[in-house]
Image: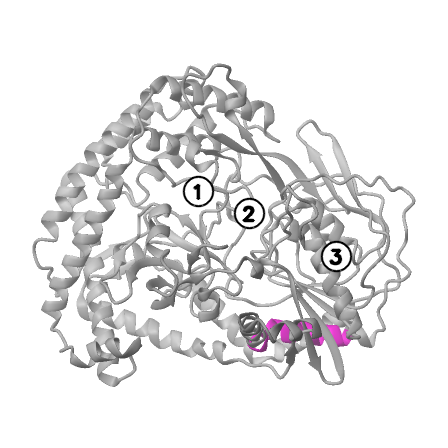
Amino acid sequence: MNTFWQFMKRNYKIVLVITALSAILWSFMPNKKADPEKDKLLLELLTFVLEKGHYDPVAMDDAFSKSVYKEYISALDPSKRFFIQSDLDEFSKYETQIDDMIKNKDLTFFDLTYQRLMERMAESKKIYKDVLDKPFDFNTNEEISVDYDKQPFSKNKSELRTRWEKQLKLNVLSSVTDKLKLQEKEKEGTADKKGAEGTKKAADSKPKTVEELEKSSRETTLKSLDEYFGFIQELDREDWFSVYLNAIVERFDPHTFYFAPDDKEKFDISISGSLEGIGARLQKKNDFTEITELIPGGPAWRGKQLEQGDLIMKVAQGNDEPVDVVGMRLDDVVKKIKGKKGTEVRLTVKKVDGTIKVIPIVREVVEIEETYAKSSLVKKGDATYGVIYLPKFYIDFENKDKRDAFKDVAQEIERLKKQNVQGIVMDLRDNGGGSLQTVVDMVGLFIDQGPVVQIKSANGKKEVLYNKQSKVHWDGPLVVMVNNFSASASEIFAAAIQDYKRGVIIGSKHTYGKGTVQNVIDLNQFIRSNPYGDLGALKTTTQKFYRVNGGSTQREGVLSDIVMPDRYSYIDMGERDIDNAMPWDKIDPANYQPVKGLDFSGTIAKSKERMADNEQFKLIDENAKWISSRKDMNVYSLNFKKFKAEESAVEATAKKFKALADYKNSLTFTSLPYEMELFKNDTLLAQKRQRWHESLNNDVYVDEALNILTDMKSMNANVKGTITLKDKKNKIVDKVN
């Protein structure tokens, strides 16, 4: 594996929430002609729009300059493998001047850093070629620290070369170790083999010596770095200027950033929808490509091996040699993973627990249908319940007559009621949000008319958004499942259900904590007779959401009524882990009345008692602690024996937690009658639902959710007595959250 990157300290900050209007900072286009006057105009425009349109514009002063400086230098050289200390000494003269340079449209600092980066990259290319031309000695007792945040820049070029040598040595050492493990598995007959050709290849291959593996690993590393630097050479001045601009605008808040002209139309750079691919959404995370979402029904989702949070290290086409994709542009990684239906791609990924795995996936046309709401019946004892899974709060803004999440969930509730379900689980895990109108309407499926969420604009104006539904569709026991990745509109829904005391919120300690809304502003509208061509757009935060109780969901998210341990329990996740995230605050509560007559304290206490005695939850918690302890491991031996021993110890511990995947509950999940009819002519849909039901059978969280519903049912919970408010300002704001 490419350990030069593999052991880089993981940054668990999620700096980009994928919405219907998303783009990727690191998406560049080659061969653009530099135009300093256009760059000056962009600086002026962005400053103007941010000062006038941002919800809470920051003061552009010396402190602002220092934060921009830090983020910009980090964006240019996150692993500190290009610049040396003399460069930083020269750059630092401008550390407190960036604010003034923005106002004066002065490009001196950018021009200096850009030119110096090009020089240092050219020098580094010569270094790695020279280093990889000679064998490494793995018998020396050397170490390397990969905590780049705490590392100083190299004092001089000699020290920089030494750093490159160690990094490349770690890379090759890790690759050799991985190949030896694979050889051992092949010898034991436990290695993964794909098809007759792969089996024959494994059988006919003769084990290689450490020396042979070292040589081939150096060659592979050289090839990967050559590719990486080849991509770097495609970038020009305008591309790097986009990095500078985003270092500026992202200091306002994590969700504000500049779209380059070609990025404006890229709503979701991913492998999803109707594309031929693996069915996964990707985003850049420092130099890595991270799996942010698996599309239900897609090949990656069905394969059960790829997970949210996995980092893609290498990509191979079938049995071809894998290509290192660390440091590559997101677009280029996507191109390598995408391919024709029926072809195979092999992803080498680093799992959340630090283990490395090669995952083969056969590409398919990913069905967009699986992004819609779906439901299942579930038998628990003599009772029947319903589970509704909602991946996002979707809506077609261009055609309101088409499907949307509100209408689909309402329909699923009615279908479940016909089956006499005695409780419903709303599964909003990994739901990143969507339409504000949709979530306001959807809350109305479960509560009587009243306020759902409050919105405050930059001018201080407050709006209360009301549920305008004429009837409550479901008034029985309700459990809402969330996790760390439930964000935005999901948090509005969970908060409303919690504030009205309508149901029980279960899952991670807290949801993501995104309590803001963004608008995309076309910069071209401000310039008449524009001689510079397309100027791109700015996505900026314009409003903030508040619960009906007055509290913000920003940073804090929604705290679960029943906290369930998960693999991220001891890791800071979400908005609260981003240094420039907007703060939590509160406003006056709306005029609302919680549902009377419901007390979930007994239900909550019973659930906590069950989980405390549940061996699966105990193992999950132990695994979470182990993952947390490993994330700060930054020093690795470059001695072969010591490194191998360290790796073996990690694998030995990881084996203990493989039992987590073996869990299976005793619940029975079935599709609704209307789907059973569809299965007769749609075998693919039948397979998708079977795969979903299998995942529910392996889900201890769903198991406990059904236990909670059983406890609630015994309380004879109902909400028919919900207070109806007279104030019906049925004002719905049609926006994306």
Q: Quick check: 65 left or right of 691?
A: left
Tell me which secondary structure the magenta stretch mostly adopts.
Answer: helix
Q: Which residue is mark 1?
A: 24
Range shown magenta: 696-711
Mark in front: 1 vs 2: 1
Q: Quadrant of residue 551?
A: top right
* Mark 1 or 3, nearer chain start: 1
From the top left corner, tell me how far across and down residue 399 is, in percent.
66, 44
| Residue type, label 3 | Gln
Badge 1 density bin: few <14, some 14–19, many ≥20, Cα 10 Å: many
In the picture, the disc for residue 575 is 2
Q: Quadrant of residue 638?
A: bottom left
Name the secondary structure under disc 3.
helix
Observer-nearest of 383 and 244: 383
Observer-nearest of 682 and 433: 682
Q: Which residue is mark 3?
A: 498
Q: Quick check: 26 left or right of 688?
A: left
Residue drawn at (53%, 28%), measured in percent from left and top? Answer: 522
